[in-house]
Amino acid sequence: MTTFVARPTSRQNANAARAATALSFWRLLVLAGFFGCFLLLIIARLTTLALFEGSRAYGATTSSYVPVRGDITDRNGVPLARTIRAYAIWVKPSALLGDRQKLAQDLATIFPDTPQEEFYAKLTAKESGYLRKRALPEQVRQVHNLGEVAIEFPREDERLYPQHDLAAHVLGYVAPGGTGALGMERVMDSKLRDPKLRGEPVELSIDVRVQAALEQELARGMKSTAAKGAAGVILDVKTGEVLAMASLPSFNPNFPNFADERTLEADLALGKTPIDYQVNTVTNRVFELGSTFKPLTVAAALDAGTVRNLAIRYDATAPIEISGFKIRDTHPAGRWLNTPEALVHSSNIVTARIADNLGREKMEAMLRTLEFDKRPRIELAERSRPLWPKSWGRVTNMTVGFGHGMSVTPLHLATGYAAMVNGGIFRPATLFKVPEGKKVPGKRVFAAATSARMRQLLRMIVVDGTGKKADANGYRVGGKTGSAEKPGVGGYARNLVVSTFAAAFPMDNPRYIIIAMLDEPKGTAESGFQRTAGWTAAPVVNKTVMRIGPQLGIIPDTHRDVDVSELMPLLWSPKGGN
């Protein structure tokens, strides 16, 4: 019996094919939808990580990261202080797997500044803690390669001072609690930590190029004269902006850990510095600045009219004896001197006579107008009060005239000289950058004519007097030396001096004041075995001006100078004083 099987028709074949195609399509569609959802989940997760987790784990590498503390820059945008995400090394001793003694040895090899015993103590402690508060990426890699799972590498905010100890006293540092402890870090603490403001850097008036030159030349001068310390400041005479402020010895604000006097030698070996190194000598210590006061006395006398004719001579043939005191010259001229000669040869006797004629009231008024009776006006909190005379009699008035009997900071002297040469206007110093073209208000201290005359006299002191070694070729430097014996128990210590040179340049159109001071310089071969300012502080000014002049846009010109032709006939003795 034959069996017949029905064959599908062509129409049935077509329907089956369409059904299979449709089934495949829907399967693919479902699969694509599944992968699409999976992809969207991945994208969403990556976005979340980038926006939130990334800012915590890799803050410094994402554009959304806002530092916990704002940056500080110099006037040209060069970073002076900034916050970065740094590495720390953390250990959980209870989870350690390897040999602790061997691990301590390996860590001491990676960090040779830390004893092996200290690492071992941390590895065997009961509590978790830091192995290193801060570590370089290369050091982190080496520790990671030790393969110990109980060691972690958290990222934490760190205040970094990329210029190291440059302008340390201006910047200060941040204490472990995260607050500013010194300098501008302290002054601007709330602003630097304000979330609304910390995204924009704070511009200071400091110029790192000028700052570096001043610090280096002061350090050289300090070393060559075996001085105890040094200080200096460079000031814009028109705005009061501080372009550089240096105090030596200094410290590195990246490592604000100070030596203990009990273990000083060991601490110094570890890079720690004595705590008194953080004192800013420019603003927070006072000195009798000696003969640098003499031009201020002469300027006050010119203004008051007690000195009208510069050719009039004063008796300098013998010391002045008054009230049991003797006022004498370091290098007596033994003759009568006029006012230009008194400044050029730095005569205490003649300056005392000029101060006596000026009188206490006018002398005191001038110094008060220059704010020599107050803490120096600047943003820093570290400012010392001057030592103002308790009783101001005739003798005091005469000695203050040549810089004895009153102690002020080097910054007082800088702002006073700025007023004396800039046309007579006093302006307080500032560490904030002044916008270009902005006029800074001030108060008149000296007449414009007096200021013009003082520019001539200061230039003569450098050309023909005690300040010759400050004469930077082509920069028309003017200024005055000051070599004051330091007061001590029972009187003045004749073997200890503070040597200062107060200068301005270029004197035909003064732009900058520069003060250089050396504390207790010794007579060495490099200083001609002299301790006085003409041999010690004046060369520092010379070298500094030669370096910073071109940086500040002042091109040396040997064909220009202050016209002192009318005063030159008044000088006839080549000998100088202090």
Image (cartoon, rainbow, N blue to C red):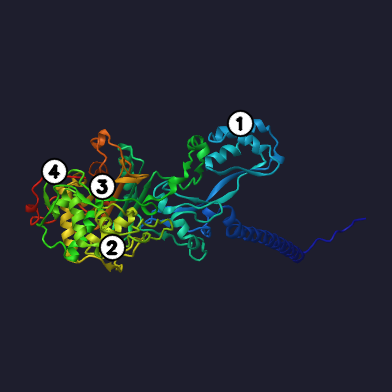
Asked if residue 459 is positioned above or below residue 490 in the image, the reply reads below
Q: Nearer the viewer, residue 153 or 392?
A: 392
Name the residue beneath numbered marker 1: 105
How far is mark 2 from mark 1, CA to CA?
68 Å
Mark 2: which amino acid? Glu
272 relative position to 478: left or right: right
How far is mark 4 from mark 1, CA to CA?
69 Å
Q: Dot 3, crowdedness within 10 Å: few (<14), some or many (≥20)?
A: many
Task: From the image, state whether disc 1 or disc 3 is nearer to you.
Answer: 3
Task: From the image, state whether disc 2 or disc 3 is nearer to you.
Answer: 2
Residue 556 visible somewhere in the drawing: no
Q: Identify the secondary structure beneath mark 2.
A: helix
Horizontal and vertical percent for residue 214? 32, 47
N-terminal of the two: label 4 or label 3? 3
Mark 3: which amino acid? Val
How far is mark 1 from mark 3, CA to CA?
51 Å
How far is mark 4 from mark 3, CA to CA?
22 Å
Task: Residue 364: give its label.
Answer: 2
Horizontal and vertical percent for residue 128? 67, 44
N-terminal of the two: label 1 or label 3? 1
How many numbered discs sit on the rendered protein? Answer: 4
1 relative position to 514: left or right: right
Mark 1: which amino acid? Gln
Q: Identify the secondary structure beneath mark 4.
A: loop
Name the residue beneath numbered marker 3: 541
Mark 4: which amino acid? Lys
Name the residue beneath numbered marker 4: 575
Q: Are marks 1 and 3 in contact (CB under 8 Å)?
A: no
Q: Dot 2, crowdedness within 10 Å: few (<14), some or many (≥20)?
A: some
N-terminal of the two: label 2 or label 3? 2
